[in-house]
Amino acid sequence: MYGNTTRALPWVRSYAEAQAVFNHRGAVRSKKWMENQRPLYKTYFHYRVVKYANHFDVVLYNTVMARYYEPTMVDGKQHERRLFMGDNSITSKDFMHYVLGKDSWRRVENSQRGEVIAPVYIKEFMRDGDERFSADFMYVDGVLDTTKSAHTPHYRLVSGTEDKAARAEVLKKFDNYLMLAQMRLPEFAAEVTLANNLGRPWAGGAFSEYDARDCVEKIANDTATSEDIHAFFEMCQDAFNVLASKRAYKQKDFTLQPRWHAPNQQVDSLDKLDKQITADEMRKAVSTRILKALSLTKKSVRQTIPQFVVEKDYPRSNVSW
């Protein structure tokens, strides 16, 4: 793609629009082009619409991104089948958005039962001839009919009984360490580091994952030295720093240590927090780090998400296909 070329391309969202583009564009006089092919932009071969006996293909490079079948009349209503295939490249996402009116992640469509999520994923679930598609939609009088449509199955990963049992077994072994972490809360508070880069959204701690995995694994395997135990409680201190910094970040009247050098900046102390860190919160934060270090936070049970759910029932994260 050269710049934002896709923004200059025409809409091709249906059989009628594909036919209009095909009829408007003249045949390109070149051996590279076939009689049933038309460019979407100048004479660029990688953006094209291809006409067949009963359908049009909208092609990006060598991928059929959309296939529109000629509408048919059933009981006085127009039925049009439209197939789509998602792709993860930036060019493909732009092409889908600006040309096909679709998005690879999720898309709200008007259906016979109201607005639903009709996603076009990057994983195929069917083939039409030799071409792969991830969405097979039927539109009746321009409205999606979910009873005659389908898309790539999707699911969420959730914790199963075995996952929970494995975590409980590990945390039982760390029970004494977790109790000590709770008891040392005043020490962690005295040594706390409150910083903007620890409190902002998605921020992690300063203690490396490698060091966390190393000390936690040795404790779990009963091979820990005094240095490993010291490292474990350094990890606990870091967990406390993150907890306190995130709480301070959300408190509007709290001034955190900035990300840039500001020697005259007045920084608030832990005492200014409206709500102090509790022993239970500390235990939970350290437990999470232990499980993460031992790769026990993964979820192994697939929970199927129904097709064409309403937007409020579509997960905001943890969606796989």
Image (spheres, helix red, strand yellow):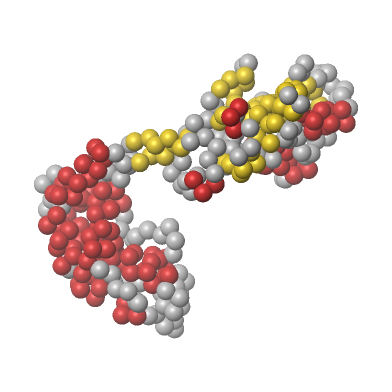
- Identify the residue shown where x is 31% and y is 51%: 209
**Position of residue 127 measured from the top left corner of the image (x, y, whole percent):** 58, 20
* Residue 91 seen in the figure: no
* Residue 144 occupies quadrant: top right
**Position of residue 314 measured from the top left corner of the image (x, y, whole percent):** 50, 44
Looking at this view, is 101 or 181 the one in front? 101
- Residue 210, relative to residue 132: is it above or below? below
Query: How many numbered discs?
Result: 0
Taking 6 as reference, is 121 left or right?
A: left
- Identify the residue shown where x is 53% and y is 30%: 152
* Residue 161 seen in the figure: yes
- Residue 207, relative to residue 138: is it above or below? below
* Residue 195 occupies quadrant: bottom left
**Position of residue 91 measured from the top left corner of the image (x, y, whole percent):** 65, 39
- Identify the residue shown where x is 18% and y is 50%: 171
Taking 259 as reference, is 227 left or right?
A: left
- Identify the residue shown where x is 15% and y is 61%: 179
